[in-house]
Amino acid sequence: MRVVDMARREINAKTDILFDYQEIKEGRKVVALRFTIARNARADTPDPLRDDPRLARLVARLSAHGMAEEAARAIVQTHEPELVEWATTDLARRLKGKEKIDNPAGWLRKAIEEDWRPQAHPILPGAIPGPRK
């Protein structure tokens, strides 16, 4: 029933239909399935990622690099868009430059979670020692 379970999870998550099923068995053999279908109230809640084209585009960019859509949505919701934009652009630049990255989705996740953006380090007065006397 793995195929039906996968379909159920996807339909329940992405549509306004909520369904479940019950196996009808004779002995150990499944001879039929009884489906229960209802309205999915969770799908009626507004989705900020669908309403904002920039966030939807970021999810698509993360997914294009092999990240699962649910993971991409979670990252876009929990991190600032500029950071996600930077990471996807930097990854594309590295891949175009023939840098070998075995797991682009993992690289993106780590770059975003650890904020690999170049940081400006101001030089503090007196931090650089002057000539010794």
Image (cartoon, rainbow, N blue to C red):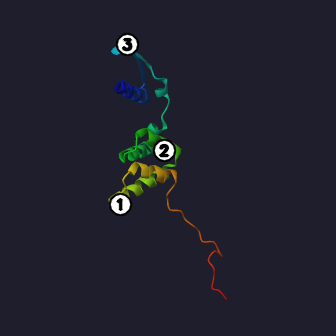
Q: In which quarter of the image is residue 13?
A: top left
Determine contact: label 3, label 1, CB under 8 Å.
no
Q: Position of residue 55 (x, y in %)?
A: 45, 44
Residue sitting at the far top:
26
Amino acid type shown at disc 3 = Ile
Q: Look at label 2 and name its amino acid.
A: Ile
**Which residue, given by chain and number where applicable, does mark 3 sit on?**
24
- Quarter of the image for residue 121 reads bottom right
Which tag, 1 or 2, sits closer to the chain's start?
2
Residue 45 left/right relative to 3: right
Q: Nearer the viewer, residue 78 or 22?
A: 22
Residue 110: mark: none
Element under label 1?
loop
The CA distance from mark 2 to mark 3 is 40 Å
Q: Name the residue under label 2.
A: 75
Taking depth in this image into account, of 118 and 44 the one nearest to the observer is 118
Residue at (34, 15) in percent of width and height: 29
Mark 3, secondary structure of its residue: strand
Q: Where is residue 120 in the image (x, y as percent from the top left)?
A: 55, 65
Q: How many labels does the image show?
A: 3
Indicate the quadrant containing the C terminus: top left, top right, bottom left or bottom right.
bottom right
Residue at 63% in and 79% down: 129
The type of residue carrying mark 1 is Glu
Q: Residues within 10 Å of mark 2 (few under 14, many from 20)?
A: many
> SS of the residue at dot 2?
helix
Sooner in the amino-acid sequence: mark 2 or mark 3 = 3
- Tell me which label, 3 or 1, sits earlier in the chain: 3
Depth check, mark 3 against mark 1: the one in front is 3
Q: Which residue is tagged 1?
A: 99
- Mark 1 vs 2: CB contact within 8 A: no
